[in-house]
Image (cartoon, rainbow, N blue to C red):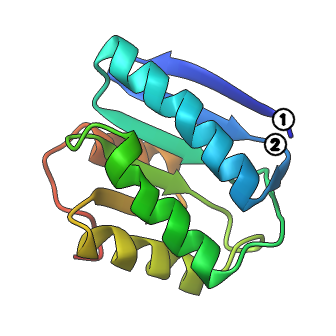
């Protein structure tokens, strides 16, 4: 699994180059949460555009999303950047729906600039 983590002002950028699996998601979630708490960051951008889609089920998406509640501060905004050629739009919508049902601030984007602007705003997720 290849990835980089860096800060851009009040946002943590997590870029994944390897295969995206539930195990990878949980591991990177822990690392990202530590950084967000340590530096008091506002949001997290997970860039999956170069990631390969591993074996990820609907249940996996649900479990990873629900775990955001206990791992991240409640004020954290989550944006996922994805390539529709590699990940399905239905998985993206499911992630957003689960997050919204749990009261999380999360949205999925295909454009990095739009994701960064949303993370730094007070706007509701685009699909709500």
Label 1 Cα crowd, 10 Å radius (few <14 / some 14-19 / many 20+): few
> In the image as oriented, which residue stretches furthest toward the left?
122
> In the image as oriented, which residue stretches furthest toward the front?
70
Q: Is residue 33 visible?
A: yes
- In terms of secondary structure, where does tag 1 sit? loop
Position of 30 with respect to 3 (left or right) is left
Position of 128 with respect to 22 (left or right) is left
Q: Is residue 114 visible?
A: no
Screen quadrant of the N terminus: top right
**Residue 23 in picture, x, y percent from top left:** 73, 53
Disc 2 designates what residue? 17
Q: Is residue 124 above or below residue 78?
A: below
User: Could you tell me which residue is drawn at 46 percent across and 72 percent down?
Assistant: 95
> In the image as oriented, which residue stretches furthest toward the top?
39
User: Could you tell me which residue is drawn at 32 percent across and 23 percent down?
Assistant: 41
Residue closer to the observer: 109 or 77: 77
Position of 61 with respect to 66 (left or right) is right
User: Could you tell me which residue is drawn at 62 percent across and 24 percent down?
Assistant: 5
**Do the residues bearing badges 1 and 2 touch, measured as CB atoms within 8 Å?**
yes
Disc 1 designates what residue? 2
**Residue 120 in picture, x, y percent from top left:** 25, 37
Q: Is residue 61 above or below residue 7?
A: below
Residue closer to the observer: 115 or 17: 17
User: Could you tell me which residue is drawn at 46 percent across and 80 percent down?
Assistant: 93
User: Quarter-wise, where is residue 87 in the image?
Assistant: bottom right
User: Quarter-wise, where is residue 116 in the image?
Assistant: top left
Position of 71 with respect to 10 (left or right) is right
**Residue 110 in picture, x, y percent from top left:** 55, 61
Q: What's the CA distance linking mark 1 and mark 2? A: 5 Å
Screen quadrant of the C terminus: bottom left
């Amino acid at each position: 699994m290849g990835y980089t983590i860096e800060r851009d002002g009040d946002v943590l950028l997590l870029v994944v180059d390897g295969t995206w699996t539930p195990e990878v998601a949980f591991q990177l979630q822990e690392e990202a949460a530590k950084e967000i708490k340590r530096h008091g960051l506002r949001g997290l951008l997970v860039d999956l555009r170069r990631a390969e889609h591993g074996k990820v089920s609907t249940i996996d998406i649900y479990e990873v999303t629900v775990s955001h509640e206990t791992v991240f501060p409640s004020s954290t905004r989550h944006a996922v950047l994805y390539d529709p050629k590699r990940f399905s739009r239905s998985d993206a919508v499911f992630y957003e729906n689960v997050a919204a049902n749990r009261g999380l601030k999360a949205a999925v984007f295909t454009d990095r600039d739009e994701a960064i602007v949303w993370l730094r705003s007070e706007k509701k997720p685009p699909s709500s």
